[in-house]
Every structure is written in C-alpha cells, then in structure tokens.
Amino acid sequence: QEWSAHGSMLVHPSNVYVGLKLAKSYLRQGEAIRLSAIAADLDGKAVLGRKLSVESARLETEQKGAEWIDKEVDQASCELDSAEEPRPCELATKGAGLYRVRATVVDEFGRKNQTESDVYVYGDTEKDRDLKSEAVTIVPDKKEYAQGDTAELLVMSPIAPAEALLTLERAGVVRERRFRITKTTETVQVKLDGDFQPGATVHIHVVGSAVREDAQNRADASLPRRPAYGQ
C-alpha cells in the first residue's frame, strides 16, 4: 500500500506590510497623486516608526530588440514615518499616461516588502501601449456607488475624434446615450437614478477613423485615414 499527502503554506516576504490607498483612480494632467500609507504586521495591527518610501513614475513602453519593456519617467517620491493612522503623501505628475505608485517598507531583519497600485493621468499627450489597439478602456472614479449617485467615467478610446454609444445594462439594456469623443481621453457622467441594485454594466462603442501606418508600421498622417471602431 502507498499513502501520500501534501500541504501548502504561506510565506511572507517580511514581518511588515505596507498599505496604499489612492484618493482617486484617475487624474487630470498636472494634478497631484494623493494617497495615504500605513504599515501593519502579520496580524493587521499598525506598526509605528517604520520608514515608508513611496514613489511614482509614468510608464513609457519602448522596444529593445524583439521585446517591449516599461521605462519609468516623470518620477516623484516622498518619505514617511508610519503611525497609528495612515500618513498622507502627494506625488506630482507631469505627462499624461499610466503611473505606477510603489511603497516600500523594511522589517527589523532588513527584508523588504512592496505594494504597488496604478493610476491613470489623462491629457492631450498620453502614450499608453497598454491601451490595446481598437479597445476602449473605462475607469470609474469609485469602486462602489449608492443609489442616486452620479458616476464619472474616464473613457480611453483608441481613436479620436469618434462617435460613441454608451449603454447601461442590467438584465438587458436599460439606457442608451450617444456622445462625441474629441480626444483619446474623455470623461462622461452617468446618473444612477434607476433600480440598478446590486449592480449594472456600462459598455461604450466608438466608431471613427484612425491614422494609417506605413510599411515600417509607423503612423503616417499623410496617408488617407482608415475606418476604425472600438468597444
């Protein structure tokens, strides 16, 4: 006879974790990233007097050989001492795009622990290769809403200008709204004044035209624009 058994275990990188909370999930270009940070032990209790290093950087994707890598630019940072309550921090933004916020804490044995979060900064000059071609990305300003709230949505479109159709769905299409997109990043507000509990889904479809690429896969504005759509 043969008997076997197996088990699993959780291995913590250090005795201390650092928590991050962003004030907003997206910002306008030039607006500061506002956040709060706290250190906690493995039981979730606040750890006082730990150095918290918080930094942010805008991600630019560049090609090296056959691979695409993320390059960090427009960096900012702040140093905090952990306390019983979360400590505030503000990080400046410059160009538009995707920013990565990273917080680091070190325990008494010199072991590092990191927490990361992303925030979108929109404007007229964003370069975001994470926004897939012909795909529309929607970022809500909050994770949860109450009945009667107005949701503000950041819409990142692969094409602009474009005609857009927003549908609010719950067990079928509840509401439709048509609007025009003039830039690749726009904000749109949706009033949640119907019976949307426990939740609803937003879809946005866009149609328009985009710049054609030349034989070297580079955008060429001198060529006739091509039809394009996204969803």
Image (spheres, rainbow, N blue to C red):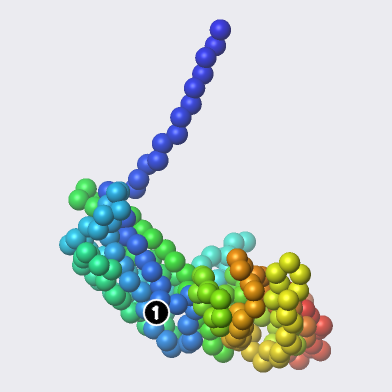
Residue type at numbered disc 1:
Ile
Instruction: Tell me residue 148's x, y (percent).
Output: 56, 80
- Whether 5 is drawn above or below 189: the answer is above
Q: Residue at x 34, y 48 (%)?
A: 13
SS class, disc 1: strand
Q: Residue 181's image quarter?
A: bottom right
Estimate how packed mark 1 is, as few (under 14), some (14 to 19) or many (20 or more) residues with alpha carbons within 10 Å: many
**Is residue 16 found left or right of 220 in the rendered image?**
left
Q: Residue 76's image quarter?
A: bottom left
Which quarter of the rendered picture does the N terminus lie within? top right
- Whether 130 is drawn above or below 122: the answer is above
Q: Residue at x 63, y 72 (%)?
A: 196
Counting labels gives 1
Q: Residue 230's image quarter?
A: bottom right
**Is residue 42 found left or right of 8 in the rendered image?**
left
**Is residue 209 found left or right of 42 in the rendered image?**
right
Direction left: furthest residue:
49
Which quarter of the rendered picture does the C terminus lie within? bottom right
Instruction: Tell me residue 9's x, y (percent).
Output: 41, 36
- Is residue 57 at least partly visible in the picture? yes
Q: Residue at x 41, y 83 (%)?
A: 93
Direction top: furthest residue:
1
Instruction: Tell me residue 191's x, y (percent).
Output: 61, 83
Q: Residue at x 45, y 34 (%)?
A: 8
Which is nearer the eye, 148 or 2?
A: 148
**Is residue 109 found left or right of 8 in the rendered image?**
left
- Is residue 73 at least partly visible in the picture? no
Instruction: Tell me residue 133's x, y (percent).
Output: 70, 73
Which is nearer the eye, 61 or 141?
A: 141
Would you name the residue on which mark 1 appears? 33
